[in-house]
Amino acid sequence: MGAEKKWLFTLFSVVFVSVLLLLLYSISAFSSAKPFPSAIRHGAHYPPSFAYYITGGRGDKDRIFRLLLAVYHPRNRYLLHLSADATDDERLTLVTDLKSVAAVNAFGNVDVLGKADRLSHMGGSHTASTLHAVSILLKLDPSWNWFIQLSAFDYPLLTQDDLSHVFSSVNRNLSFIDHTSDLGWKESQRIQPIVVDPALYLARRTQLFTATEKRPTPDAFKVFTGSPWIVLSRSFLEYCIFGWDNLPRILLMYFNNVVLSEECYFHTVICNAPEFRNSAINGDLRYMIWDSPPKMEPHFLNVSDYEQMAQSGSAFARQFQQDDPVLDMIDREILKRGRYRVTPGAWCSRHGSWWTDSCSQWDNVNVVKPGPQAKKLEETITNLLDDWNSQANQCK
């Protein structure tokens, strides 16, 4: 009889524990149900929003996904582009990865370019691709304030709450674009040579075609050059796309045959357009270290560069090796971001832990809470605006 009672006690215990676990699971499932997205408000009284164009090629799927999580915010708009040399499987896997992010599913503000553009290194196809992206972003959601172009080799040095807070006090018609009319050696090696980018008309990737003769430097407009990494206002880009005068189209035709046109096109348009030449802030908000003598791309950043990078007052840094340990440092020390999770902000309504994502539920997405990095960027922008107000470094 004692054995029978012991068996019944064991059976009762198993049933009790099973029912308890089922009840806890049900409560957890109910409490973690996805809420309706918070209403996103735009206008002068709300924080600005950004349209991100993030690009990469074959093998860059994981880089792009990590970068997207690092710069994600429900108020922003994102267009991801794996160029034509990437496989369809990579694009499909990227879409699948995005579906695993609760906020991306709820707010629907991330798109992957399905018909990829073909790009040639140093060719005009890069400029064409950027204009294509701007057109798509304007059609998807014309309420954003600034366009930011990043590559899979970039990474942020602040949260989106930091960025929105600092840009809340910036005139929304201003663009941040490193520029100069002092062409130097670029005049003979970049501006005067005539090149043809085969990615604009061939299905396969080939090298640029270079003509044997050069053409004179233009005198109908002034050529400007600078960094290809840009933060451009929506008003200026609407001018580039819709062009109520012919300048953007004329310059596009000219720079189509220029080496590295992405280092000249927007710079020359903004500094030759009377309506916008006084809106160009001379800085790209990027942290980079160049080798000496400088190569085509900046130095790969690593852990030894972290302190200087974090104190630089830049919004973004480049370039990084895939999954370099310094990226983990930025995630941990600056972004407070867990692996495979978006960067938390004031919009997240949970306290995160190793088993829960703090941004799987959300509150008011129109509120931002800046952190320490915001002060550093604010100082950088204040210095740039002081130069701009003095007109000492403005389209010259």
Image: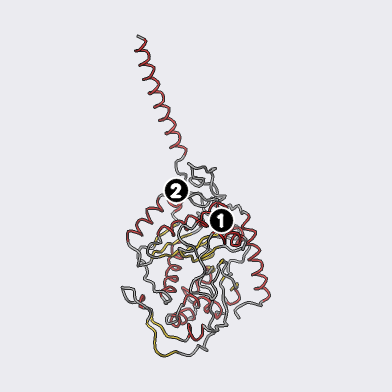
Give the residue at the far top of this rendering.
Answer: 1
Query: Which of pointers 1 and 2 lies earlier in the amino acid sequence?
Result: 2
Position in image of residue 224 (x %, y %): 54, 80
Between the residue at mark 1 and the residue at mark 2, the CA separation in whole angstroms equals 19 Å
What amino acid is found at the position of numbered circle 2 in the picture?
A: Ala
Could you tell me which residue is drawn at 60 percent across and 73 percent down?
282
* Pick the front one: 301 or 208: 301
Mark 2 burial class by Cα count in 10 Å: few <14, some 14-19, many 20+: some
Q: Which of the 4 quarters of the picture holds residue 286? A: bottom right
Mark 1 burial class by Cα count in 10 Å: few <14, some 14-19, many 20+: many
In the picture shown, does residue 333 fall above or below 206? above
- Type of amino acid under label 1: Thr
Residue at image coords 35%, 9%: 1
Q: How many marks?
A: 2
Q: Is residue 281 above or below residue 350?
A: below
Q: Residue drawn 44% across and 59% down?
A: 63
Residue 228 pos. (x, y %): 50, 72
Residue 195 drawn at (x, y percent): 41, 83
Task: Return the mark for residue 159.
Answer: 1
Tell me the element at label 1.
loop
Q: Nearer the viewer, residue 351 or 251?
A: 351
Residue 6 placement: quadrant: top left
Q: Are marks 1 and 2 in contact (CB under 8 Å)?
A: no
Q: Residue furthest left?
A: 203
Residue 102 is tagged as 2
Task: Please determine whether, in this image, residue 68 is positioned above or below residue 348.
Answer: below
Please state the horizontal and vertical placement of residue 129, each as a whole percent of the image: 42, 71
Residue at 48 percent of width and 49 percent of height: 37
Q: Nearer the viewer, mark 1 or mark 2?
A: 1
Q: Is residue 48 left or right of residue 37?
A: right
Label 2 sits on a secondary structure element that is: helix
